[in-house]
Amino acid sequence: MIPTMADLELTDDVPAAADDGVWLACIECGETFAPFDAIRYTCDDCDGLLEVRYADLPTFDEFEGSGVWRYNAALPFEEGVTLPEGDTPLHEMPRLEDDIGVDSLRVKHEGMNPTGSFKDRGMTVGVRVAQEVGVDRLACASTGNTSAALAAYGARGGMETLVLLPAGKVAAGKIAQASLHRARILEVDGNFDQCLDIVQDLAQRGEAYLLNSLNPFRLEGQKTIGLEIMEEFYADHGEYPDRIVLPVGNAGNTAALYKCFRELVKAGAITEEQVPKLTGVQAEGAAPMVEAIEEGYEDTRRWEDVETRATAIRIGNPVNAPKALPGIRATGGTAVAVSDEEITEAQRDIAGEGVGVEPASAASVAGLRKLRNEGVVDSDESVVCLTTGHLLKDPDAAAEAGNAPEPVENSTEAVLELIEERSSVAETVRRQASKAADSPLVPGLVAGGLGLAYLYRKFRSKQ
């Protein structure tokens, strides 16, 4: 599992800079630093990304309790600023499993965290670190979920929070969360990457403590997603998943999961052969990671203009690419771009199983479907799709993707008439589909299930 780019190999050597068995290491030049003696996000010497390293790495037997802090043996503290978070469901998806055509499909729904996204896992650790280094103002750039989580955990920790958002590009539900948790919200005339440039500048000037995923401690909390997946999947199936498919924005989760697996291998908890293939999914309008994988680049190339309805992954410069690209390559995974239409279709499919997610979350299922259709994913694979945010994070997108309300007069008779009318139309659709199936012109169409879908959509458009 030696990566092809940055130096991510874990070492047995404990540097003098270690504090109680914890230190920071630069993935580019290898320099090491004490974890809490100063505020740093990148290497002092070469500006490379930092990773948190540990002298002792636990196995599954050493974990107890629930949620993120069940895994404190693999984290810098016994407990953080907690609401609490983690312990999210690993849903079965029987109809989607059959439809996509894989041996097993589970959905890890991170939208069930306290503020409705996976970001809470990183904030419980990151805000605790902020307390440790003695800061009182927290800041982030955000497409929405980070701001909501930072505001909530900052409030819990009694700290001032500042969030920079790209004006007009963040879902209302996420802004409402940050606002209610008393964050100061600045809407910047620019995109997410430009907001992050400003926040990094503020952090370098000592004006705030940065809690985007450039902060290495954020990813420590997020790696517990991988620990939960491995434990839960093994408990249900007696084996670990072959592949984990996840949406990619800043690539923090991809980097965090790869770190999780490297540590499990180093600890002897799993073998290299048991490491799931990390598979990233981006929207076509914001796909620098996919470009890097397809073109064989060592790093991503910044996309200045990005656009997708999946606002949480509308990012053109994924700062964790130097950690994430090696993870995809070393595990035998890949990356794929999907259209907004494919994302919306997947969002509907997931909702059809009773699970509500925001558009960016559905990218994982859309990507799995595309890779399965292309033969990249085999039918005998067991797969976990990560969904990162709750349906109500973006209620406008949910309303657009779902069924429209039907006006009806104020009487039981009117309601019954409308119900019967719809039932009658549905029966007509079924009869027409049956006739179509008997036609020599369209057997392939109906056999693929497309005839019924066409007729139903035609009816919906007339309505």
Image (cartoon, rainbow, N blue to C red):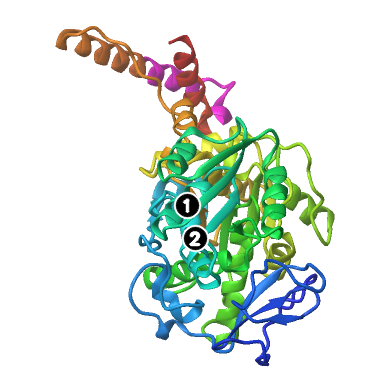
Give the CA separation, mark 2 to mark 1.
7 Å
Please state which of residues 433 and 301 is positioned toward the viewer in this rendering: 301
* Residue on which the image places disc 1: 149
Q: State yes or no: residue 160 in magenta.
A: no
* Residue drawn at 43 percent across, 75 percent down: 71
Position of 321 relative to 276 (above/below): above
* Residue drawn at 46 percent across, 82 percent down: 73
Q: Amino acid at mark 1?
A: Ala
Mark drawn on residue 123: 2
Position of 353 relative to 134 (above/below): above
Please state which of residues 372 and 142 is positioned toward the viewer in this rendering: 142
Tell me the quarter of the image containing the C terminus.
top left
The boundaries of the magenta stretch are 428-445
- Residue 107 visible (yes or no): no
Q: Is residue 393 left or right of residue 426?
A: right
Sequence-earlier tag: 2 or 1 = 2
* Residue drawn at 41 percent across, 50 percent down: 115
